[in-house]
Image (tube, rainbow, N blue to C red):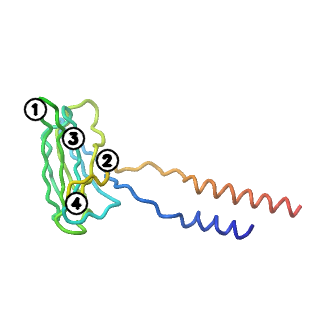
Amino acid sequence: MKKCLFILLTLLIFPMASANAIVITYNATDLGSGLWQYDYNVSDYDFDADYGFQIFYEYGLYENITPVSSPSDWDVIAYDPDLIFDSPDDGAYDALALVDGASLAESFSVQFNWLGTGNPNGQYFEVYSPDYAFVDSGDSVPGTAPVPEPTTMVLLGTGLIGLAGYRKKIKKS
């Protein structure tokens, strides 16, 4: 019994490693008159040379997408949403790593005109390899993260420890 409890506690304290998804966070600043700036950060991925990512800006909601700042070891271009062959095409911020281990320690910034109602939200992004194969994707999220909730394993572990203590107390009585 003690061995099983020790193994369970070890698993709870040192959880098995899991694959981290790439996370792009943004902090939004309203610059007035429909002009916005997003300061982005990318985490949980080491970019080698010729790997990159694109952040997409939906047709009809964004225009004048302009990179304001980017780390020096990245090649960056941006293009506006447009009609291509009478079909709407999203705009994008495209960043290509120029060296292995390209730095994303600093944030990068993009300004754009928001054409929608309310405030703009996160955008869809894709990460690609040198042969432009898909690596990962997701939606950018606000940089101010909500308060994290306890994980299922912590709750389960706490409950099991409580039951073990209760059982030990009953045996002593």
Q: Residues within 10 Å of mark 3 (few under 14, many from 20)?
A: many
Relative to residue 162, is residue 59 depicted above or below?
above
Between the residue at mark 4 and the residue at mark 3, the CA separation in whole angstroms equals 20 Å
Relative to residue 98, is residue 141 depicted above or below?
above
The residue located at (69%, 66%) in the rendering is: 5
- Mark in the foreground, 4 or 2: 4
In the rendered image, the quadrant that contains the N terminus is bottom right
Question: What kind of element bears circle 1?
Answer: loop
Numbered badge on residue 51: 4
Residue hosting label 1: 85
Residue hosting label 2: 140
Question: What kind of element bears circle 4?
Answer: loop
Q: Residues within 10 Å of mark 2 (few under 14, many from 20)?
A: many
For badge 1, the amino acid type reads: Phe
Q: Nearer the viewer, residue 161 or 97?
A: 97
Q: Quadrant of residue 12?
A: bottom right
Left or right for 8, reference 23: right
Q: Are marks 4 and 3 in contact (CB under 8 Å)?
A: no
Between the residue at mark 2 and the residue at mark 3, the CA separation in whole angstroms equals 11 Å
